[in-house]
Image (cartoon, rainbow, N blue to C red):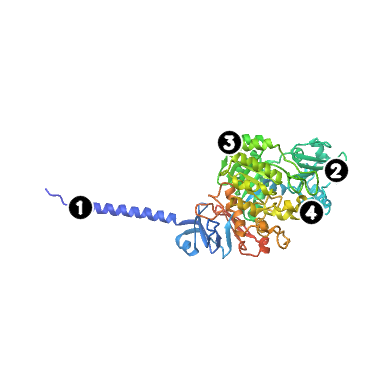
Amino acid sequence: MAISAKPFTKFIGIKTVCCLMLLLSVFSCQQKKENNADLLVKNARVYTIDNRFAIAEAFAVRDGKILEVGKTADLEKKYTVKEVVDAHGKAVFPGFIDAHTHFYEYGMGLQTVNLKDLPSWNVAVDSVKSYAKNNTEGWIIGNGWDQNRWKTKQFPNKLKLDSLFPERPVVLTRVDGHAAIANQAALNIAGIKPNQKVAGGAIETVKGKLTGILLDNAVNLVTHKIPEPTEEQTQNALLQAQRNCFAVGLTTVDDCGLDYPLVNTIRQLQNRGDLKMRMFVMLSDNQKNLDLLFRNGAVKTPRLNVSSVKVYADGALGSRGACLLKPYSDQPKWNGFLRSPQKHFQEIAALLAKKGFQMCTHAIGDSANRVMLKIYASVLKGKNDRRWRIEHSQIIDPADFKYFGENNIVPSVQPTHATSDMNWAVQRLGKIRLKTAYAYQQLLQQNGWLPLGTDFPVENISPFYTFYAAVERKDLKGLPEGGFQKENALTREQAIKGMTIWAAKANFQENEKGSLEPGKFADFVILDQDLMRVKGSELPKVKVLQTYINGENVYKKP
């Protein structure tokens, strides 16, 4: 008996059609999902800072990351978006990364006496008096004084502080953090005596009496006696610092030298969504921090990276704590000093290499740089990708530049140091040594890349001051007319890379931030003027219109 094929064919046809319709529906939904975006930035001059230094018109963002970069018309046609930002032709850059800050210290400083840029010690003391009237209990803490700005150029004496505050302890830190003046009440609490010696520091004594001036490790004798800030003060410091940094376009900061317990506070605030700033934290060089780091391992989240240790080789040039190969030109028989024995630096370098962590060392003087470069070279043994850093790399003997390139050692520099120091650095160093100080172009040539930072609160937090100092080599008054040692100025392209992709690379994060490319975090800024095109004299006046992290607006100019 023959069976008709028509019903079977009809059944197969219906089933096939249904399957095709289902597949088309799934494909359509998938396509619709792929063409959805959370944010579209359009009609902009987008500096992607990619390998070609390409300039685009627009980019789409989804789930906090760059989805696609291209032309405004193409992306408008392709994507259905929740939010559109029309940049109206303004310049857009990746969020700025400051490769060397003291972010938390800056925040804490906002709650103390601000002594920056004051013209004399008398004016500084008046500021302390005013602060004390409104803050009547506990230690008086201030920061930012700089004797190089005063007519006398001499360190102050504590006598006025003793007279005003005979019982209340006062400690005022110099702008670079490497010197302080303390009154007698504070010195008594710390048990400091005339002519007392301290390794890696100095206690100034004149005619058998303490002047109150403390250098480097001696500062810690007093500051370690200050009561720990409350949790509320700590959190307020971080959040206040964040607000100010967002206003100047910073989306990542490298905080150079924190204790491990503070990392837990940072994580809590970030997990709560209050602290949105991305942070690369270097732990301070002490045994407790090392023990916790080795026990717990590196911390790596989208907003926090803790995988390096900050070591101090010497002090600062302004306070004559920088360690020089030959005596200071303005203080014969004084070379400065190392803050720890060379054996310590060698031991910690070997330990960090073994454990696989990054070493970042503060080195200002040519002697300190030579010591650390040779120690790094003995451990790194030539070409590598450990990205060990010398923070500041400020004064380099001509024979020592080669160590950076031969061992891929990263010089991490702060361009505003050059323009802040230039008027008095020659007095400390003489003309010959000065020629290879603040030598950013020479340092750049060693590895082909150079991360830039500010060292705030030592310098202003503004990335635009960094950019201006790097390319113009002038102070905010436009001096010197031809630029300070202009042969070591950076090009604008080099400077912007130093504030974005190269700073990210110094943190091993160049694959997730530092440029506006698909797959990277949507961290970006919209500026009122174009850094790459505006006149050099106008660079410090550039303002941020909006700052975004993860595609979220975290600052908008009022």
Packing grade of label 2 (10 A; few <14, some 14-19, many >=20) is some
Q: Which mark's residue is nearer the viewer, 4 or 2?
A: 4
Q: Which mark's residue is nearer the viewer, 1 or 2?
A: 2
Give the alpha-carbon distance from disc 4 to disc 2, as whole Å: 23 Å
Q: Secondary structure at mark 1?
A: helix
Q: Which residue is mark 3?
A: 354
Counting residues from the start of the chain, the first of labels 4 and 3 encountered is: 4
Q: Which residue is mark 2?
A: 162
User: Residue 392 at what x, y percent from top left?
Assistant: 67, 48
User: Residue 284 at what x, y percent from top left?
Assistant: 66, 40
Query: Image height check: is 169 above or below 472?
Result: above
User: Residue 261 at what x, y percent from top left?
Assistant: 64, 38
Contact between labelled residues 2 and 4, with CB atoms less than 8 Å apart: no
Q: Secondary structure at mark 3?
A: helix
User: Can residue 251 be spotted in the picture?
Assistant: no
Query: Image height check: is 309 above or below 15?
Result: above
Contact between labelled residues 2 and 3, with CB atoms less than 8 Å apart: no
Packing grade of label 4 (10 A; few <14, some 14-19, many >=20) is some
Left or right: 329 with respect to 468?
right
User: Residue 87 at what x, y percent from top left?
Assistant: 56, 63
Could you tell me which quadrant the C terminus lies in?
bottom right
Marker disc for residue 149: 4
Q: Which amino acid type corresponds to the residue marked 3 in the rendered image?
A: Lys
Packing grade of label 1 (10 A; few <14, some 14-19, many >=20) is few
Q: Which residue is mark 1?
A: 7
Give the alpha-carbon distance from disc 1 to disc 2, as whole Å: 107 Å
Residue at x-position 57% and y-position 65%? 89
Counting residues from the start of the chain, the first of labels 3 and 2 encountered is: 2
Give the alpha-carbon distance from disc 3 to disc 1, as whole Å: 76 Å
Q: Which mark's residue is nearer the viewer, 3 or 1?
A: 3
Q: Which amino acid type corresponds to the residue marked 2 in the rendered image?
A: Asp
Q: Secondary structure at mark 2?
A: helix
